[in-house]
Amino acid sequence: MQIFIDSAEVKELKALAETGLVDGVTTNPSLVAKAGGDFFESLRTICGAVKGPVSAEVVAQDYPTMLLEGRKLRQLADNIVVKVPMTPDGLKACKTLEEEGHPCNVTLCFSAVQALLAAKAGATFISPFLGRIDDGGQDGMGLIREIRAIFDNYDFQTQILAASIRTVGHVRDAALAGADCATIPPAVFRALYKHNLTDAGLEAFLKDWRGTGQSIL
Ligand code: E4P
């Protein structure tokens, strides 16, 4: 499963890219507002730091303006992916932009039939928001499983990008459910490394090694 980071914080993304484990980035207007700074400049820097897909969202709601915004965003860097909302105009823009060779990520997906429509529009990515579904007392991971089954039934190539991830368990379950990618907040990404038995085991190994009085270098 590809690991994307869900953030627009340039400094943070540069640091995480150095782990060598980051396959891409997703941003959205709320994350951009939270990060501050110039939108276009930040995107250029992020696209330089992370070689994989970097989603940047259009804010227009009508088809013609979405096309203009999407094409403009794509001029920033080759690895920009145009994020469009799961609306009739958004899917129409997705179809046109994909036909022009601009990869799209359809965002704000909350049902399997929405994902089916996005796949039919030729989207490169569909983003089911599993955390927000869980927040509403429903089964976000169930949606990932449904979309996986539908895409496999018809051999759709659209990649399932599990979004609105809140926990380490979400990452594990998205991988088990067959998501192609998960976009993960920085804090959750850092938590993926952690296990109390890893910490305790390492401490014991190092204590025993010190007792030998030897060194490797
Ligand atoms: C996905 O691309 C979105 O940016 C994101 O995952 C939304 O997550 P949230 O529900 O935590 O805002």
Image (cartoon, rainbow, N blue to C red):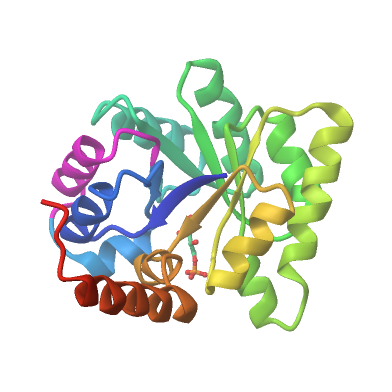
Residue 77 is situated, as x and y percent measured from the top left of the image, at: 26, 28
User: How many numbered callouts?
Assistant: 0
Quarter of the rendering containing residue 106: top right
| Range covered by the magenta-colored residues | 38-54
Residue 57 at least partly seen: no
**Snapshot quadrant of residue 150:** top right
Q: Residue at x 50, y 25 (%)?
A: 97
Does the magenta-highlighted stretch encompass residue 55? no
Left or right: residue 150 versus residue 108 is right
From this view, report whether residue 21 is shown above or below residue 131.
above
| Residue in front for this viewpoint, 103 or 174 | 174
Percent position of residue 124, x then y: 57, 32
Provide residue 162's location: percent of width, then percent of height: 60, 55
User: In percent of the image, x 54 and y 70: which residue is there?
Assistant: 168
Residue 81 position (above or below residue 28): above
User: Which of these two is toward me, 185 or 201?
Assistant: 201
Where is 199 relative to 91, above or below?
A: below
